[in-house]
Amino acid sequence: MSELLCCERCGELTIFERMTYINNKPICSSCSENAVYALQTADSEEQ
Ligand SMILES: [Zn+2]
């Protein structure tokens, strides 16, 4: 049985295995691409 989690960004229900955790929040695969890119951009701007 796969657990369904609610995406922290878009609110869509996604299977647990497909979730990515960013800052301890479950993010669906489509949102995670944008979220990871945003984090990397924020990091590079600080350096
Ligand atoms: Zn999402």
Image (tube, rainbow, N blue to C red):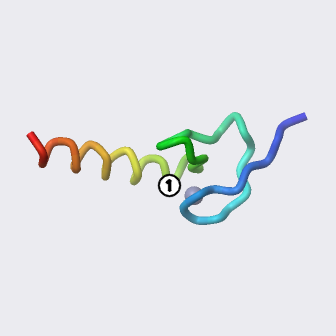
Residue 12 placement (x, y as % from top left)? 68, 62
Q: Does the beta carbon at disc 1 come under 8 Å from ligand 1? A: yes
Which residue is situated farthest in the bottom direction here?
10
Image quadrant of ligand 1 equals: bottom right
Q: Residue at x 73, y 50 (%)?
A: 5
**Mark 1, secondary structure of its residue:** helix
What is the three-letter code of the residue carrying label 1? Answer: Cys
Residue under label 1, please give it.
31
Residue 19 in picture, x, y percent from top left: 62, 41
Relative to 44, does residue 17 appear above or below in the rendering? above
Q: Quadrant of residue 13?
A: bottom right
- Determine the residue positioned at 50% across, 54% down: 31
Picture coordinates of residue 41 (x, y %)? 22, 48
Q: In the shown orientation, is residue 12 left or right of residue 39?
A: right
**Residue under the point 56% across and 39% down:** 20
Which of the two residues, 4 or 25, is positioned nearer the viewer here? Answer: 25
Left or right: where 39 falls relative to 33: left
In this rendering, would 14 be left or right of 43?
right
Image coords of residue 11 (percent x, y): 65, 64
In the image, is 25 to the left or to the right of 22? right
Q: Residues within 10 Å of mark 1 (few under 14, many from 20)?
A: some
In what quadrant of the picture does the C terminus appear? top left
